[in-house]
């Protein structure tokens, strides 16, 4: 079981990503296109053009870590927000994305949010 970071946000990069990129290339996208710091405790997600591969980049206590998933069948959902370079997700959205559930079509019930 891999423990993913919970201290920062979860950000899904909105554009297709070249899956040949590794630590430095993905960190460059985070810095240059998202305007964020790769080692701030956030989880950054990248999906390829065919939407069957996903890479996650995060800071793991003493260095960068990359997690990579390649689907045998099906695709990941790429969520888009008008003009935004990334979409902020929560833990439930991440679980749905990895589980193949459509986030955009899922209905959320009204809940009290802490201020």
Image (cartoon, grey):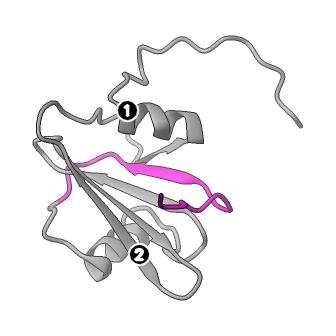
Which residue is the extreme one toward the right?
A: 115
Identity of the residue drawn at 64% across and 60% down: 8
Magenta residue span: 1-17
Q: Quadrant of the C terminus?
A: top right
Question: How many other residues sit within 10 Å of disc 2, few (<14), some (14-19) or many (≥20)?
Answer: some
- Write down the residue under mark 2: 65
Residue 10 within the segment the image draws in magenta: yes
x, y percent for residue 9: 60, 54
Residue 5 within the segment the image draws in magenta: yes
Q: Is residue 91 left or right of residue 25?
A: right
Q: Is residue 75 left or right of residue 29?
A: left
Identity of the residue drawn at 59% across and 82% down: 61
Which residue is the extreme one toward the bottom?
A: 62
Using the image, tell me which numbered label, if any, was put on residue 85. Answer: none
Identity of the residue drawn at 58% across and 41% down: 91
Majority secondary structure of magenta residues: loop
x, y percent for residue 97: 39, 35
Element at label 1: helix
Q: Is residue 13 left or right of residue 59?
A: left
- Write down the residue under mark 1: 99
Towards the viewer: 15 or 93: 93
**Res 64 → quadrant:** bottom left
Instruction: Say if residue 60 shows up in the picture.
Output: yes
Instruction: Say if residue 81 shows up in the picture.
Output: no
Q: CA distance from mark 2 to mark 1?
A: 21 Å
């Amino acid at each position: 079981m891999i423990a993913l970071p919970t201290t920062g946000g979860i950000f899904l990069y909105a554009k297709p990503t070249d899956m040949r990129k590794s630590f430095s290339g993905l960190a460059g996208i985070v810095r240059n296109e998202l305007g964020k710091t790769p080692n701030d405790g956030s989880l950054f997600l990248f999906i390829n053009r065919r939407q069957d591969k996903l890479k996650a980049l995060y800071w793991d206590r003493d260095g960068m870590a990359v997690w990579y998933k390649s689907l045998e069948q099906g695709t990941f959902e790429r969520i888009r927000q008008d003009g935004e370079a990334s979409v902020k997700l929560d833990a439930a959205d991440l679980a749905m994305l990895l589980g193949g559930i459509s986030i955009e079509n899922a209905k959320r019930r009204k809940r009290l949010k802490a201020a």
